[in-house]
Image (spheres, rainbow, N blue to C red):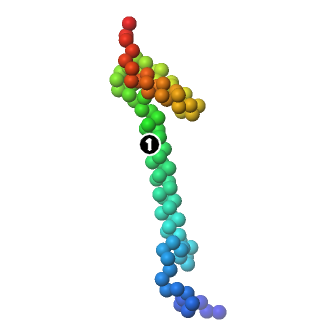
Amino acid sequence: MTTTAEMHPAAPHALPFFLPGADGADPLLLVAGGILLVSVLGFGLVFLRIHTLPERMAHRGHKLQFEIVAVLGLLALFTHMHVFWVAGLLLALVDLPDF
């Protein structure tokens, strides 16, 4: 039996781009996987950047309550209770008097 590289006469000559080639290469799968990986990493970075916002604000302002804001941020991260994050944000915005 001999193998020939000619196409079947009933096969269409122009195949859509989303079909994998005869060699098994699937470029659309690789592109979709890359987009998915970049979007998940990007979303994670944006989430962590927003999550550390109160701590960065308290650190930038040299607040006395910086440690409390940092602990509230960790509690919000590990318990998934947003009230700790909001409390840390409010505490980072307030200037406590130094007695």
| Residue 80 in the image, given as x and y percentages of width and height | 57, 33
Position in image of residue 51 (x %, y %): 47, 35
Residue at (43% x, 18% y) in the render: 65
- In-front residue for pair 88/48: 88
- Mark 1: few, some, or many residues within 10 Å (few <14, many ≥20)? few
Residue sticking out furthest to the right: 1
Looking at the image, can residue 74 be seen? no
Count up the numbered dots.
1
Asked whether residue 23 appears in the rendered view, the answer is yes
Secondary structure under badge 1? helix
Q: In the image, what residue occupies the spot 51% across and 25% down?
A: 72
The residue under the point 37% across, 10% down is 98
Residue that protrudes farthest toward the left in the picture: 61
* Residue that numbered label 1 is attached to: 46
Residue 53 image offset from top left, x and y in percent: 42, 32
Q: Viewed as shown, does residue 1 lie left or right of 43?
A: right
Figure check: 95 above or below 47: above
| Rendered position, 80 above or below 68 | below
* Quadrant (top left/top right/bottom left/bottom right) for the C terminus: top left
Q: Which amino acid does label 1 sit on?
A: Val
